Image (cartoon, rainbow, N blue to C red):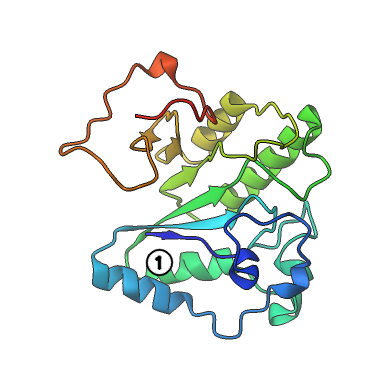
Amino acid sequence: MFLHFGVNTFTDSEWGTGHESPRIFNPTGLNTDQWADSAVQAGVSLMILTAKHHDGFCLWPSKYTNHSVIGSPWKNGHGDVVQEFVNAAKARGIDVGLYLSPWDRHDSRYGHIKEYNEYYLAQLQELLNSYGGVREIWFDGAKGSNATNMTYYFNDWFSMVKELQSTINIFSDAGPDVRWIGNEKGYAGDTCWSTINATSLSIGNASIVK
């Protein structure tokens, strides 16, 4: 079960601009237990939360940015959606996964290769050190056609992930552990072995559709 929750929930957008004020994030009925109960009823064994989507807003109180729940009126800036999500899922025996968008439309470090990769690694470290066992981590290569050019140190990211959580699955459109089925329409073969030459894959290459 994939949960896309954040500032976009309050702007009715799929992709945020990065200019949203953290103050618009103010859920009045947030109940992660209800999320997890729904997952149990549906027979779901893994829940994945957008800890940070393309707009750059963080659902946990990251010490590396103020563009997060820290700047929200929700719980007077002391809330942590990721922690509540993890608590609810694990209490019901559901594995947790986290989505951390490489593309960040808010942070000024984006486009500065060394600075942004260090920032991203630091946030990865926060998430994988602070919330217990994480079953899957998502690296989405999506970004807008006019987005700033950026080189991601994917190999460094993968190495850190495996160092911090040796049994985790890494998802991207090119793997290395789990790969999308090749489209976002939900169509897949039965059985779907995703047979493809891995040397032709690269993260964020939208021309590779299977």
Q: Quadrant of residue 96?
A: bottom left
Looking at this view, name the residue that lies furthest to the bottom: 28
Residue drawn at 40 percent across, 29 percent down: 209
Left or right for 95, reference 114? left
Q: In which quarter of the image is residue 16?
A: bottom right
Q: Name the residue under label 1.
A: 89
Q: In this rendering, is residue 136 above or below 114? A: below
Q: Which of 45 and 1 is in front in this view?
A: 1
Q: Nearer the viewer, residue 151 or 123?
A: 151
Q: Quadrant of residue 152?
A: top right
Give x and y (percent) for residue 170: 45, 37
Looking at this view, name the residue that lies furthest to the left: 190
Crowding near the residue tagged with mark 1, few <14, some 14–19, many ≥20 C-alpha atoms within 10 Å: many
Q: In this rendering, is residue 150 above or below 135? A: above
Left or right for 141, reference 152? left
What amino acid is at disc 1? Ala
Give x and y (percent) for residue 112: 81, 31
Give x and y (percent) for residue 4: 51, 61
Q: How many labels does the image show?
A: 1
Q: In this rendering, is residue 96 above or below 198? A: below
As helix, strand or loop, the secondary structure at mark 1 comes to helix
Residue drawn at 23 percent across, 31 percent down: 193
Residue drawn at 57 percent across, 24 percent down: 155
Screen quadrant of the N terminus = bottom left
Q: Which of 167 and 68 is in front in this view?
A: 68
Screen quadrant of the C terminus = top left
Give x and y (percent) for residue 158: 53, 31
